Amino acid sequence: MKVLVPVKRVIDYNVKAKVKADGSGVDLANVKMSMNPFDEIAVEEAIRLKEKGVAEEVVVVSIGVKQAAETLRTALAMGADRAILVVAADDVHQDIEPLAVAKILKAVVDQEQPKLVIAGKQAIDNDMNATGQMLAALLGWGQATFASKLELAGDAVQVTREVDGGLQTIEVKLPAIVTADLRLNEPRYASLPNIMKAKKKPLDDKTAADYGVDVTPRLTVVKTTEPEGRKAGIKVGSVDELVAKLKEAGVV
């Protein structure tokens, strides 16, 4: 069985993002970029399936700028077999919208014919949480989102999902789309030997035009602002004063 994993290049989660002076978006100049954390979890899960002998090949794909090749090399160093880079933008500040990404991924799926697609539930830069669902709709496949546990059982996959009321276990027939949540696994660190081996693994370069997909944005960012800073707290001298302040704030 072949497993396909989409990965996205985003600002490293340890970096504090800064808004550009003109408010048109987040400043990405000289900022450390990494693999989206949820996508990293998806890559780890696919590799574990291969190590169990369930999957035969793990293919990773990234859609965006040419610099995303570095992100794909990271996935290859973790244990993926080969990679596909679809260059869909020249400007690092241009974010390819979920629908365009889903259309390209559908074309990739049509060519690669995987039985399972494991994706991160969302990207930490735009928090859209839409690509996996859109891809499932375009393919007509079953989907299981927010997966915290995944087990293959014959021609189906059992997925434990994190929902508001707790945990929900569902079974989806293959082929299927699964989106990974935070508690699915703990991604491994790539060892130096594997990093060196990753440089020799195949990475195919494609463009959005190769798949006949128009990536022209349908959304316009009107304004980007930083969140308001927290207001300074106050010190109280007694429990009575604390209760009075809580009443003023409407807490009690």
Image: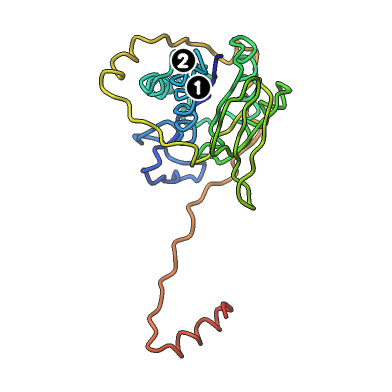
Q: Are marks 2 and 1 in contact (CB under 8 Å)?
A: yes
Assign the C terminus to one quadrant of the image. bottom right
**Quick one: SS at disc 1?**
strand
**Quick one: SS at disc 2?**
strand
Instruction: Report the mark closest to the observer, 2 or 1.
Output: 2
Q: Give the amino acid type for the residue marked by disc 1 in the picture.
A: Ser
Cα separation between marks 2 and 1? 8 Å
The residue under the point 52% across, 81% down is: 246
Q: Quadrant of residue 210?
A: top right
Q: Give the amino acid type for the residue marked by disc 2 in the picture.
A: Ala
Residue 58 screen position, x and y as percent: 49, 17
Residue 114 screen position, x and y as percent: 59, 15
Above or below, 236 relative to 228: below
Farthest-out residue, left:
192
Residue 92 screen position, x and y as percent: 46, 29
Assign the N terminus to one quadrant of the image. top right
Which residue is the site of mark 2? Answer: 83
- At label 1, counting other C-alpha atoms closer than 10 Å, the crowd grade (few under 14, some 14-19, many 20 or more) is many
Classify residue 12 as left or right of residue 111.
left
Which residue is the site of mark 1? Answer: 62
Q: Quadrant of residue 146?
A: top right
Residue 239 screen position, x and y as percent: 43, 88
The residue under the point 33% across, 13% down is: 199
Front residue of this view, candidates 147 and 225: 147
Classify residue 185 as left or right of residue 178.
left
